[in-house]
Amino acid sequence: MSEPKPQPSKSGESVGKTLLIALLVSLACSSLVASAAVLLKPYQIENQLLDIRRNILEVAGLLWTEGDINELFETIETRVVDLETGAYVDDVDPATFDALEAAKDPQLSVAVPPELDRARIGRRAKMGLVYLVRRDDAIQKIILPVSGYGLWSTMYGFISLEPDGNTVSDISFYEHGETPGLGDQIAKPRWRARWQDKRIYDESGALRIEVVKGRVPAGDPLAAYRVDGISGATLTGNGVTHLIRYWLGDHGYGPYLRALREGEGT
């Protein structure tokens, strides 16, 4: 008489079914997440563009709460500039040009010399965008994109200059990962207000603008070029100094601003 075959344990079957169900649920959830990401990507891109335009309008002094962002942005003239010469590039569409993407392409970008790269940019596009506010065909504001490393992150923002290309009107950072409550003050109105009317270059054309540690002393002969630092965020302030000096220097928008001051880039 043959021995009875062992029967599979019910507990083993239960575990197997549980694992199978868990796997199927995981696959279903992964598919839903992937599908949602694909479907939402166009909206994310649109919202990012809207946020950038909002920041440009804000530093330009044109952000009205009751206005449509895209309609207001149409009042701003956007141009592409050759950063080496400072001349406008008319055969590149500013609406589709992406300097951050161009910086990744060796054919469209240049390496930042190590001795100039205190902002840790690495590479920058050969061309850059400028945003102009005009009134009666005369430039009223010049808005330039800036970026560079702070304490923890790459900071992306805009600086707005008066028509002389030397006096700061406003500055704004729309993306960064600096320390909450400390370095993130770079995006707050109170610190931004400290930049108003500060000067970028001295009479010889040398870059002078900087964020100092603590407050600018009363009677400081260089007060016109110095911005109060953020308490507890010295390294973030240093990062802002480095990125502003790079982008407004000779390897950034310096040639363009010089052409404007000399009346050649209007």
Image (cartoon, helix red, strand yellow):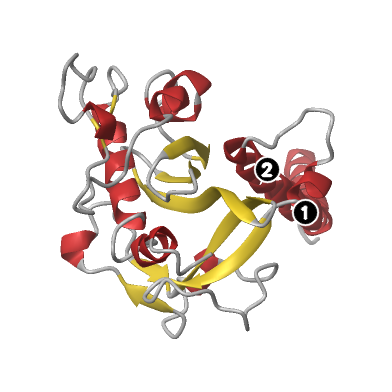
Closest to the observer, 166 or 54: 166
Q: Residue at x 37, y 46 (%)?
A: 166
Residue 155 screen position, x and y as percent: 43, 44
Q: Which residue corresponds to mark 2?
A: 51
Residue 124: image location, x then y, percent: 40, 68
Residue 233 makes an appearance in the image: yes
Mark count: 2
Left or right of residue 69: residue 248: left
Q: What quarter of the picture does the N terminus occupy?
A: bottom right
Query: Type of residue at label 1?
Result: Glu
Hey, which quadrant is residue 181 in on the image? Answer: top left
Task: Decide if residue 158 is on the left or right side of residue 239.
Answer: right
Q: Residues within 10 Å of mark 1 (few under 14, many from 20)?
A: few
Q: Is any part of residue 4 visible from this angle?
A: no
Task: Give the numbered dot on residue 169.
Answer: none
Quadrant of image for the C terminus? bottom right
Q: Nearer the viewer, residue 89 or 133?
A: 133
**Secondary element at image label 1:** loop
Q: Mark 1 touching mark 2, by CB under 8 A?
A: no
Q: CA distance from mark 1 to mark 2?
A: 15 Å
Which residue is painted at 83% across and 35% down in the image?
A: 67
Query: Is the residue 16 above or below the residue 151 in the image?
Result: below
Please say if 259 is above or below 61. below
Q: Is residue 200 left or right of residue 22?
A: left
Q: Residue at x 23, y 54 (%)?
A: 205
Q: Which mark is residue 74?
A: 1
Instruction: Find numbered disc 2 in the image and state the secondary structure of the residue it sits on.
Output: helix
- Residue sitting at 61 percent across and 79 percent down? 90
Sequence-first disc among 1 and 2: 2
